[in-house]
């Protein structure tokens, strides 16, 4: 006996399960996000602002990456990717956790994370402006210099 699953049947089952991706170009609605359709890699420009936003919010609260990861219940490696790679695409769950932790609207944070289509041009424009203005040009702190020197020493070791 051969069972034939049609495309329509697969789409319907994925929609019933919620949050599942279905092949190329189809996404099911995730009920956790009030029916918003999440799109992968919508825009890369605001992602720079997203990474800098996370870094500055973390630093303004005096948190290490490790402490923020524990407190917000997200992976440390994800935070490193967000803060250090302007093209990094975070998990939707991570953006949700950060929006809750930092008390900012998740729809807006999803936009600057590049996970939702920009609905508000002002947010898009301000995110680019924020990214340009938030680049630090201050000298390294003693802790940053020590960490950098230690890391360079390890990188310079020859086997």
Image (cartoon, rainbow, N blue to C red):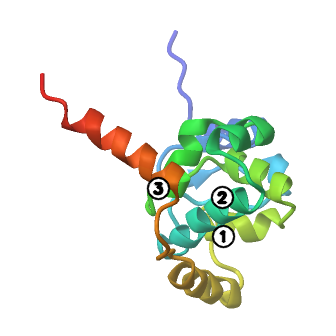
Crowdedness near tag 3: few (<14), some (14–19) or many (≥20) residues, C-alpha within 10 Å: some
The numbered mark, 3 or 2, whose residue comes first in the sequence reads 2
What is the C-alpha distance between the residues marked 2 and 1? 10 Å
Q: Is residue 19 above or below residue 89?
A: above
Crowdedness near tag 2: few (<14), some (14–19) or many (≥20) residues, C-alpha within 10 Å: many
Query: What residue sits 57% from the left and 72% below the top?
Result: 49
The numbered mark, 1 or 3, whose residue comes first in the sequence reads 3
The numbered mark, 2 or 1, whose residue comes first in the sequence reads 2
Residue bearing the label numbered 1 = 111
Query: What residue sits 53% from the left and 67% below the top?
Result: 47
Q: Is residue 19 above or below residue 130?
A: above
- Looking at the image, can residue 37 be seen? no
Q: Residue 34 versus residue 124: which sits nearer the camera? A: 124
Q: Is residue 5 above or below residue 25?
A: above
Q: Residue 35 versus residue 156: which sits nearer the camera? A: 156
Query: What residue sits 47% from the left and 76% below the top?
Result: 137
Mark 3 or mark 2: which is in front? 3
Q: Residue 91 versus residue 10: which sits nearer the camera? A: 91
Residue bearing the label numbered 3 = 84
What is the C-alpha distance between the residues marked 1 and 3? 19 Å
Residue bearing the label numbered 2 = 38
Question: SS class of the residue under badge 3?
Answer: helix
Q: Which mark is residue 58?
A: none
Extreme residue toward the left, this view: 159
- Looking at the image, can residue 62 be seen? yes
Q: Position of residue 10 (x, y in %)?
A: 62, 37
Is 29 situated left or right of 130 in this image? right
Q: Position of residue 85 (x, y in %)?
A: 44, 57
What is the C-alpha distance between the residues marked 3 and 2? 23 Å
Query: What residue sits 52% from the left and 9% below the top?
Result: 1
């Amino acid at each position: 006996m051969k069972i034939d699953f049609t495309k329509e049947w697969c789409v319907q089952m994925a929609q019933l399960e919620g949050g599942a991706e279905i092949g190329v170009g189809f996404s099911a609605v995730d009920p956790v996000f009030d029916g918003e359709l999440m799109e992968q890699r919508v825009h890369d420009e605001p992602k720079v602002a997203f990474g800098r936003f996370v870094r500055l919010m973390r630093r303004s609260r005096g948190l290490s990456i490790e402490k923020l990861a524990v407190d917000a219940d997200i992976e440390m490696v994800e935070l490193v990717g967000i803060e250090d790679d302007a093209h990094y695409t975070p998990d939707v769950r991570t953006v949700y956790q950060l929006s809750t932790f930092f008390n900012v609207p998740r729809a807006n944070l999803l936009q600057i994370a590049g996970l939702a289509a920009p609905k508000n041009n002002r947010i898009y424009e301000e995110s680019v402006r924020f990214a340009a203005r938030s680049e630090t040009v201050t000298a390294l702190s003693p802790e940053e210099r020590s960490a950098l020197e230690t890391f360079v020493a390890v990188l310079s070791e020859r086997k």
